[in-house]
Amino acid sequence: MVTCPSVLNPIRLLLRVLLNPLAAVREAGALESVPPWWQTFLRLALPVLLTSVIVSQWLYQVMPSGLPPEAMPDAWGFGVYSVLAMSIGTLGMAWSAHYLTELFQGRGDPDRAMLAVSIGLLPAWLGKVAAAFPWPWGNSIGLLLILYSLWLLYWSLRGILGLKRGNRIGLFVATVFCGAFITLILGWALMDLIPGATPETRIGTTWLL
């Protein structure tokens, strides 16, 4: 029986995703039993996204952003907002994948869906850190990591949920759309509720990214 002793090791899995992503997906997909969805979230997704927020907020404080002070949100307020919004997005995307799998002629499994989404989003969370570096290198690398994350998310959903050919792209598109929709709706509401999450003067519409 294939077990999962190290699949929730964030550092090991992040290195595997960056160096040999398809092997990491195959390894996760071959597991006969995966951790419960809440365990995957607390031990894999939350530590990585929390670390990415802390590091990126620290970088924003020590590196010049090129924006006036009134256009910068409070570090703590925006940090709390980012963790909550990213957590909501991760959970929303995972549960969307779980319920949508049956629509695309698969078998819903919240535990495997959470594992697939968490693995797929690892590069995007790293991209949040990269985007904190000065323009244009930081934003460019961050964008590349987000695109890489979308590619990896497709393969994670395909390999870990085990959908049949012909249904994979549909599930991927629907999952990304539902996850983004949930994040946007609840994210904008959170932004107005958390003190300091919004700057005095908003420039652009990039505060959810």
Image (cartoon, grey):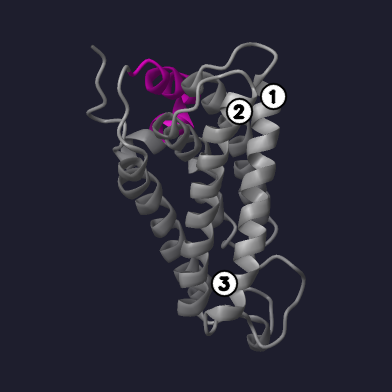
- Between 58 and 29, which is closer to the camera in this rendering? 29
Q: Which mark is residue 190?
A: 3
Give coordinates of residue 141: x percent, y percent. Answer: 62, 48
The N terminus lies in quadrant: top left
Inspect the magenta stretch and tell me whether residue 62 lies in it.
Answer: no
Q: Is residue 43 above or below residue 102?
A: below
- Please identify, in this view, whether the residue under mark 2 or under mark 1 is nearer the observer: 1
Quick check: 104 above or below 90? above
Q: Earlier in the sequence, mark 2 or mark 1?
A: 2
What span is in magenta?
A: 15-31
User: Residue 16 placed where, x, y %?
Assistant: 40, 29
- Residue under label 2, please give it: 154
Q: Amino acid at mark 3?
A: Leu
159 or 137, nearer to the observer: 159
- Disc 2 to disc 1, how far (Cα)? 7 Å
Q: Please, what secondary structure does the residue beneath circle 2 have? A: helix
> Is 60 located above or below residue 196 in the figure?
above
User: Mostly what secondary structure, the magenta segment?
Assistant: helix
Residue located 49% across and 48% down the image? 91
Quadrant that contains the C terminus = bottom right
Mark 3 burial class by Cα count in 10 Å: few <14, some 14-19, many 20+: some
Q: Amino acid at mark 1?
A: Ile
Mark sitting on residue 169: 1
